[in-house]
Image: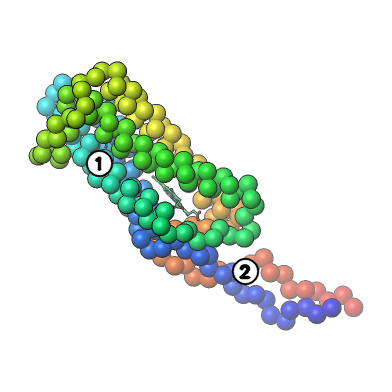
Amino acid sequence: MQFPKQAPAQVPLPARYTGTAIALHWLIALLLLGQFAFGLMLEDIPRGTPERSYYVNLHKSSGIVIGLLILLRLGWRLTHKPPPLPASMPSWQRRAARVSHVALYVCMLAMPLSGYLASNFSKHGVKFFNVVRWAPWGPDDKALYAFFNGAHHLFALLLAVLVAIHVLAVAKHTLVDRDRLLLRMWPWRGAPAVDTSFKPPVETR
Ligand code: HEM
Ligand code: HEM
């Protein structure tokens, strides 16, 4: 029997997302984290005060800008195929990755959309960065406002749960499977890894 004389010293680097997809992923992840904390902070500001109006309008404005970035990201995603997943990934994991990514996109879109719709069914509308007032295009309807505000709250919870699962999945790939999946979305190319699983054959003659 012929044994290989040389160990395959390096694990090949995984295929990566495009630079634009990577930049948008991390920019939006950071902005969403900040926007989430900002939303929670709003709950501590007493209602009916000028201070609350100032910060709520700031939250609405930054949320609309993030929403536009999310649309840009979705447009990029729909026109650029992602790199193929590692061949070692079982089919249930591929399906789980696809479903969870779609769910993340749905929540990312639903957050700014539900906030924007709620604002337009209240007399307040949006004062963009506290400078330009956009009058609401809908009626001041308490039931519709409560519906979209409830959706905003629910999608915020769902997004938090999905992001936690997403990060745990990446941690599992990195620490357990060691398939370097994170490098597909990492801004910097990693160095090829040494294959520590290689065991030189022992001749038994
Ligand atoms: C881009 C993503 C956004 C995220 C992650 C986000 C997140 C949050 C969170 C976590 C809260 C506190 C919990 C809750 O009441 O739901 C909140 C509250 C709120 N958000 Fe957003 N938001 C976003 C965009 C927007 C936009 C675009 C608007 C409106 C144009 C908006 C309007 C509001 C309002 C008015 C509240 C206060 C609701 C209340 O206290 O009754 N949000 N947001
Ligand atoms: C608000 C936070 C985040 C959101 C909303 C988010 C969302 C997403 C989405 C939608 C995708 C699918 C990309 C596509 O196919 O278009 C993705 C991929 C990815 N994300 Fe995140 N992400 C977040 C945070 C993170 C963090 C903190 C990490 C690192 C631990 C991470 C690592 C990755 C990796 C490695 C991929 C590529 C997965 C693959 O190759 O299939 N993400 N993310």
Ligand 2 closer than 8 Å to the CB at disc 2?
A: no
What is the three-letter code of the residue carrying label 2? Asp
Does residue 16 appear left or right of residue 46 in this picture?
A: right
Q: Quadrant of residue 33?
A: top left
* Quarter in which the N terminus is drawn: bottom right
Q: Residue at x 54, y 60 (%)?
A: 84
- In the image, is residue 122 above or below residue 22? above
Determine which quarter of the picture holds residue 201. bottom right
Say which residue label 1 marks.
Answer: 64
Residue 48 visible in rendering: yes
| Distance from the alpha carbon under mark 1 to that under mark 2 | 46 Å
Number of callouts: 2
Residue 202: image tag: none
* Amino acid type of the residue tagged 1 in the rendering: Ile
Q: Secondary structure at mark 1?
A: helix
x, y (%) of residue 167? 48, 46
Residue 170 image point, x, y percent: 51, 50
Vertical comparison of 175 with 196: above or below: above
Q: Quadrant of the C terminus?
A: bottom right
Q: Is mark 1 within 8 Å of ligand 1?
A: yes
Q: Residue furthest bottom?
A: 5
At horizontal 32% and vertical 26% (from top left) the residue drawn is 148
Drawn side of residue 61 relative to residue 198, left or right: left
Name, please, the residue furthest toward the left.
131
Identify the residue at image location x=62%, y=69%: 195
Mark 1 or mark 2: whose residue is earlier in sequence: 1
Q: Which mark is residue 195?
A: 2
Foreground disc of the pair 1, 2:
1
Q: Is residue 10 above or below residue 116?
A: below
Element class at badge 2: loop
Rendering coords of residue 190 (x, y %): 47, 67
